[in-house]
């Protein structure tokens, strides 16, 4: 099982890193590809990450799912990049998992794959009247998985893993990270 | 309000990034300093981060708190570094906030600042019989704040912010990241 994360400057660090970390814990490969032309990118809170590769250097066919983190301007950079939109459309046609969190569902909206679906997103980031908008941490509808934002990042990541057939691994990881321990 | 995170290879990515991100959202400065001699470090799940500075290049007196992320071998690297242990002792003497998550409370244990305190940590990372060990996401006892691991990273970060006097900001951030939205 192999997934591709597309990312650029202004990405939300918790949303990106939580998905990469949790999916790798679930034995799912994640290749992180920058769309900026540089492997070193800077997040919305000034954290610098070095990506695995560049979008122009990868074979996009070899993946089972696409991961889109939020954060601004990252989500808008991705939405306005034709290579990204074409990839979303192609993956959707092939029934591959499309996962977007926070502001990033606007990328799926631009590609036309959200209509009438059960979707969450950070408030006011998509046309909520064009979907069945749900105020929940994470929701799946067919091949589309969406998350509300930082506060739902772990649930979003676990739901992606389950959508890729890693139910048992996701459950094991949820327990292993002590997600069920009480607040105090 | 200004804090220092010490970090090395094998750091747990969600634990480190969540604390940096959330504290910066709460208007707390965070300087991330590598102890490896290189600003580029690699996490336990192979995510590469570029730190702000190196431990040898900073003035450790100018901070209000110390942040210690988990992950192995990161937590043991920090525990076995005399510069780190001396800093913990000095900060403790001055009543500065000492925050450690997951395996990292072993660093505070080595410095001798945990005894008989209310403490959480990932199971079997410290001598749990020498403290008042609590199976909770995050707990504060005086200047010592501890977190259980990845599943408690957001609560740990918010508790650090509150311990640094940023109660209102922490509450605003908790709401802003939609932490209270239901799971489904």
Image (cartoon, coloured by chain):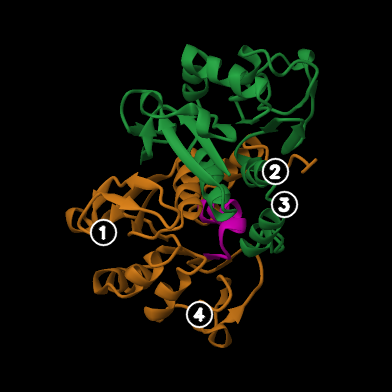
Chain colours: A green, B orange
| x and y percentages locating residue A107 in the rendered image | 59, 19
Q: Position of residue A128 (x, y in %)?
A: 75, 17
Residue at left 51%, top 55%? Answer: B160
**Mark 2: which secondary structure?**
helix
Q: Do marks 2 and 1 share a subunit?
A: no
The span from disc 2 to disc 1 (Cα, nearest Å) is 44 Å
Q: Chain of mark 1?
A: B
* Chain that bears disc 2: A
The secondary structure type at the circle numbered 1 is helix
Question: What whole-number distance in Å separates the C-alpha atoms at marks 2 and 4?
Answer: 32 Å
Majority secondary structure in the magenta region? helix
Residue at 57% of width from left, 83% of height from top?
Answer: B128
Q: How dense is the environment of label 2, judged by Cα within 10 Å: few (below 14), some, or many (20 and up)?
A: many
Locate residue B174: give its quadrant: top right
**Which disc, if any, is residue A159?**
2
Residue receiving disc 4: B126
Residue B50 image offset from top left, x and y in percent? 31, 44
Residue stretch rendered in magenta on the structure? B146-161
B74 vs B106, nearest the viewer: B74
Decide which of tag 3 and tag 2 comes sooner along the chain: 2
Chain letter belonging to callout 3: A
Q: Are marks 3 and 2 in contact (CB under 8 Å)?
A: no
User: For this rendering, which residue is in front, B54 or B112?
Assistant: B54
The reply to whether discs 2 and 1 touch (Cβ–Cβ < 8 Å) is no
Q: Residues within 10 Å of mark 1 (few under 14, many from 20)?
A: few
- Disc number lying in front (2 or 4): 2
Q: Is residue A130 left or right of residue A75?
A: right
Query: Mark 3 highlights which residue?
Result: A167
Q: CA distance from mark 3 to mark 4?
A: 31 Å
Which quadrant holds residue A90? top right
């Amino acid at each position: 099982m192999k997934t591709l994360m597309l990312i650029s400057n202004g990405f939300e660090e918790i949303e990106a890193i939580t998905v990469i970390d949790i999916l790798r814990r679930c034995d799912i490969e994640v290749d992180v590809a920058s769309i900026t032309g540089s492997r070193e990118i800077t997040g919305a809170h000034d954290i610098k990450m070095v990506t695995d590769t560049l979008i122009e250097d990868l074979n996009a066919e070899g993946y089972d799912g696409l991961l889109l983190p939020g954060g601004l301007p990252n989500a808008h950079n991705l939405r306005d990049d034709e290579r990204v939109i074409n990839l979303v459309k192609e993956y959707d046609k092939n029934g591959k998992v499309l996962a977007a969190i926070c502001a990033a569902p606007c990328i799926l909206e631009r590609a036309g794959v959200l209509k009438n679906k059960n979707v969450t997103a950070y408030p006011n980031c998509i046309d909520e009247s064009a979907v069945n908008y749900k105020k929940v941490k994470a929701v799946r509808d067919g091949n589309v998985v969406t998350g509300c934002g930082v506060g739902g990042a772990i649930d979003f990541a676990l739901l992606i893993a389950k959508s890729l057939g890693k139910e048992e691994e996701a459950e094991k990881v949820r327990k292993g990270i002590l997600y069920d321990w009480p607040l105090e």
